[in-house]
Amino acid sequence: MCEICEGKGWYSVPNYRTERLESVQCEHCLAEEELKETLSIETSKLLVNFSKEKLCRMLANFCVDVFHSRDEVSRLQTLIDTKSIVGIEGFLQVNLRRE
Ligand SMILES: [Zn+2]
């Protein structure tokens, strides 16, 4: 957690001229976001060398593991049967996030 802005991305500083608090964007968090974006682009350039099949199998194994661990294999089967690209995409977007 950022000690400057407590993870909010912005923090308040007093402006003595106007006698008000002003919101300032946290430079530290901004730099971290830029670093993450750069790393993401570089990692993406590495991953692009994987075969499509290999990447798909890795993601598919992930999907199966998650649905299986939740005892919801039938939900995955429904996505497969209905060829729900939107459903799988939504699932991946939610479940590939690390909290
Ligand atoms: Zn910060």
Image: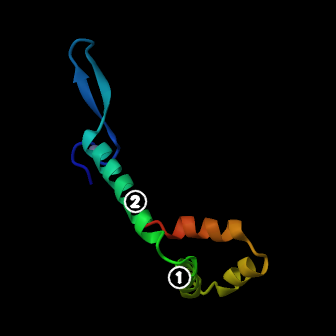
Extreme-right residue of the structure? 82
Quadrant holding the C terminus: bottom left
* Outermost residue to the front: 49
Query: In the picture shown, does residue 94 fall above or below 65?
Result: above
Q: Quadrant of the N terminus?
A: bottom left
Left or right: 66 in relation to 89: left
Is residue 15 found left or right of 54 in the rendered image? left
Return the residue nearer the eye: 29 or 13.
29
What residue lies at 79% left-to-right and 76% top-to-bottom?
Answer: 82
Instruction: Reply above or below: 40 against 56.
Output: above
How far apart are the alpha carbons under marks 1 and 2?
Answer: 19 Å
Q: Residue at x 57, y 78 (%)?
A: 56
Number of marks present in the image shown = 2
Residue identified by numbered label 1: 54
Is disc 2 surrounded by few (<14), some (14 to 19) or many (20+) residues within 10 Å? few
- Which image quarter: residue 53? bottom right
| Location of residue 90 in the rendering, given as x and y in whole percent from the top left corner | 62, 65
Choose mark 1 or mark 2, whichever is in front: 1
Left or right side of 90 for 25: left
- Quarter of the rendered image showing ligand 1: top left
Question: Of marks 1 and 2, which one's residue comes earlier in the chain?
Answer: 2
The residue indicated by pointer 2 is: 40
**Mark 1 in CB contact with mark 2 (< 8 angstroms):** no
Residue at (29, 39) in percent of width and height: 26
Give the percent coordinates (x, y) of residue 76: 67, 81
